[in-house]
Amino acid sequence: MFTGRSALSLDAKGRLSVPTRHRDALMLQCDGRLTVTRHPHGCLLLFPRPAWEAVRERIAAGGMDSVDWRRFFLGNATDLELDTTGRILVPPELRRVAGLDKSVVLMGVGAHFEVWDEVRLETRENQVAASPLPATLADLAI
């Protein structure tokens, strides 16, 4: 399970260096093979390939009422591999739709990661913090 956030920078070519703590786990779990796709909240989803394959099958099995979502997720999916220095190359079209320029945040959210523009994430988190907890978390005591 991936958790935590890392403030990172994209280089001029759109490469993102995956932190060592996650890199080692990704090499063990999927030999550095990943898939990235869009998320409707304005970030990118980054999956270890085996986790993506399970999600991909669920999306592909959707009926005719999910054609647009299938196009959204599957049509934007790109397979990636960690290079020898632990970087991934984020495709330019996905960088554009997620507003990724220089300062990004890699956030572990369970079986996958989200990749956010730093300012866009701050805006989103402020919106979430101002909203009530969902019923499923209402009794959460922290």
Image (cartoon, grey):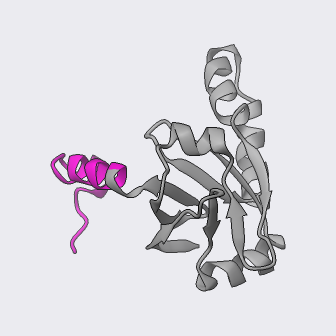
Residue 37 at x, y = what percent?
A: 65, 44
In the image, 39 versus 59, the foreground residue is 39
The residue shown at (78%, 57%) is 80
Measured from the top left, where is residue 70 in percent x and y? 68, 27
Residue at image point 46% right, 54% down: 116
Magenta residues (range): 120-142
Q: Is residue 136 visible to the viewer in this orientation of the structure?
A: no
In this view, the residue in front, 15 or 12, is 12
Q: Is residue 42 visible?
A: yes
Residue 47 position by quadrant: bottom right
Residue extending farthest front: 12
In magenta stretch: residue 72: no
Which residue is nearer to you in this view: 64 or 84? 84
* Left or right of 84 on screen, residue 89: left
Count of marks placed on residues: 0
Residue 117 left/right relative to 94: left
| Residue lying at the far top of the rendered structure | 64
